[in-house]
Image (tube, rainbow, N blue to C red):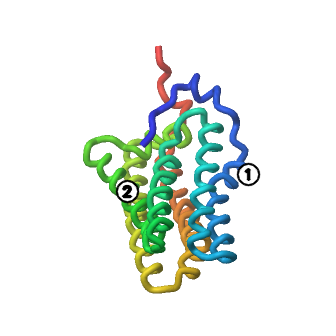
Amino acid sequence: MSEIQPPAAAATRPSQHPVVRLVVELGPLLIFFFANARWGIFAGTGAFMAAILVSFSVSLWMERRVPVMPLVTAVIVLVFGGLTLFLQDETFIKLKPTILYSLFAAILAFGLATGRNFLQIVLGSVLQVDARGWRILTVRWALFFVAMAVVNELVWRSFSTDTWVSFKLFGFLPLTFAFSLAQVPLLNRHQIDPKAQPSQP
């Protein structure tokens, strides 16, 4: 999902303030929510597409490399958002989370099946976890993404468009945050002390 950056490259990246990172990641969703509430789903979709492009550009500038997950998200938003506006059919933008979550789950599962842990590739410079910990964490996230895809299908097919848009902000985000916090005990159990690792000659 992303390449491992060498220490020298990582050191040259600009520091990412947590508030800035939060605004970049949540900004498009907030814009989508408010534009939909004010002008409807099609105006909200157009605003969402524009905000995603801005968010991706900022991520690209902050990381000084192509951020893979934001890139995949941006492409899917633009494709399904474009279909929504062109065909005037809101079904496509509602399918976007289902496709995105399913894609992430498939990528993680494919990596495990082929002996490559893509989650470790993406987060290995941030989390110091042993091999078993990475495998368990990856399986959990893959299953979580599958569950989120199912939940999205249930919500958009069972409730109004406004309810679905609200759930994207007030449902998916809290669920993802809660799931992330629930992984802390696992990370603690399988954490590796960098100082205990043998030094390279």
Q: Residue at x 66, y 77 (%)?
A: 37
Question: In this rendering, which labeled residue sits more in front, label 2 or label 1?
Answer: 2
Relative to the observer, which residue lies in front, 157 or 87?
A: 87
Q: Residue furthest left?
A: 113
In the structure shown, which secondary structural element does the residue marked by tag 2 occupy?
A: helix
Mark before the other along the chain sequence, 2 or 1: 1
Figure quadrant of residue 121: top left
| Residue 188 coordinates in the image, percent (x, y) | 53, 51
Q: Residue at x 48, y 43 (%)?
A: 68
In the structure shown, which secondary structural element does the residue marked by tag 1 occupy?
A: helix
Q: Residue furthest top?
A: 201
Q: Which residue is mark 2?
A: 103
| Residue 165 coordinates in the image, percent (x, y) | 57, 74
Circle 2/circle 1 CB separation < 8 Å: no
Q: Amino acid at mark 2?
A: Leu
- Rendered view: 195 above or below 69: above
Image position of 138 (left or right of 82): left
Indicate which disc residue 138 carries: none
- Rendered view: 180 above or below 115: below
Relative to the observer, which residue lies in front, 190 or 56?
A: 56
- Rendered view: 140 above or below 16: below
Q: Which residue is mark 1?
A: 19
Image position of 131 (left or right of 16): left
Query: How many neighbours does mark 1 have within 10 angstroms: few (below 14), some (14-19), or many (20 or more)?
Result: few
Q: Amino acid at mark 1?
A: Val
